[in-house]
Image (cartoon, rainbow, N blue to C red):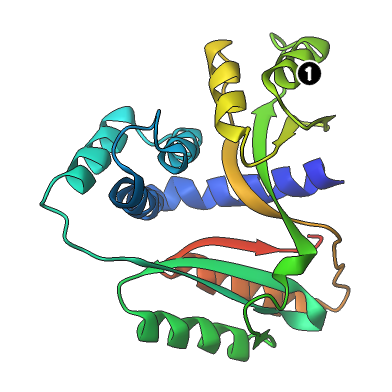
Amino acid sequence: MSGHSKWSNIKHKKEKTDAQKGKIFTKIGREIAVAVKSGGADPETNRKLKDIIAKARSNNMPNDNISRCIKKAAGDGNDANYENIVYEGYGPNGVAVIVETLTDNRNRTAGDVRHYFDKFKGNLGTNGSVSWMFDTKGKIIVLKADDIDEDTIMMDALDAGAEDFEAGEEVYEITTTPEDFSDVVSALEEKHYAFASAEIEMVPQNYVKLTDEKDILMMEKLIEHLEDNDDVQNIYHNWEE
C-alpha cells in the first residue's frame, strides 16, 4: 500500500515539476543554502547537505546548478536569512498535515498557511499535534526496468544498510533510517541505479480515506495552494489518495 501511495504522489509531483522546474529548483536551492550556512559546504562532513543533494539529483537538478547554490551559500553574496518553521494541523475529515517551510518573513508565512487551512475545511494546530502520527524515514524510489533484477536490487539495498525493501507494480521502494539514508543512496548510485525520488520525509503510521467528494476537493485544493507557496518546502499528510 505504502509503495503505491508514495509512487502516486511522486507521479503527481513530477507532472507539476515539468511545468514548474524553476520553482522546484529555487526551493531546493534555498534548502542547500540553509544547510551550507549551518554545516559547511562539504557534503562529506555535512550530512544534511548530502541528503539535500540526493533530493536535488532525484528531481533532475543539474550538477552545475547544485554547485552554484553551494558556492553562493558558502560565499558572502547570499545574505538572506531563512528560518525553518514547521506547521501542523488537520485537513478535511481529520487528515493530518505537516507543512515544512523556509521563510525570511514568519508573519507572512504563518498568515498564508493559516489562510489555506481555514479556507479548505482544515484547522491549524500546535507543534506536536500531528507529528506523533509520523515517522522520519529515508525513502528511495527506483522505477522498475528490464535491466533491473528484483533480487539483485533488494540485496544491494539491504547490504548498503536499508531498513526495508518493497516491490510495487511500477517501482521499488527502499526505506532507510535518517542516519543511513546518505550511505544507502551513495552505495546504490555507485551501482548506477537511477532514482525517481530520494529524500528524507515524514511517513504516516496510518492513513485516512476520504469518501466525500467535497472533502476530496478541499484536500486537493489545500495541497495545491501549499505547494504553490514559495515559502513551503515540503508537505506531508496521511490522506490515502
- Seen as rendered, the residue at the extreme left is 77
Residue at image coords 51%, 65%: 227
Residue corresponding to mark 1: 154
From where the camera sits, is residue 193 visible?
A: no
The picture places residue 205, in percent across and down from the top left corner, at: 83, 58
User: Quadrant of residue 132 in the image?
Assistant: bottom right
Q: Nearer the viewer, residue 2 or 49?
A: 49
Residue 180 falls in image quadrant: top right
Residue at point 48%, 34% (across, down): 54
How far from the left and from the top, in percent, is residue 125?
65, 85
Question: Tag 1: Cα neighbours inside 10 Å, few (<14), some, or many (≥20)?
Answer: some
Q: Is residue 67 left or right of residue 153?
A: left
Can residue 89 be seen here?
A: yes
Residue at 79% x, 41% y: name it: 3
Q: Residue at x 75, y 81 (%)?
A: 92
Look at label 1 and name its amino acid: Met
Quarter assignment of residue 121: bottom right
Task: Tell which of 63 and 60 is nearer to you.
Answer: 63
Q: Position of residue 212 (x, y in %)?
A: 85, 79
* Residue 65, above or below 224: above
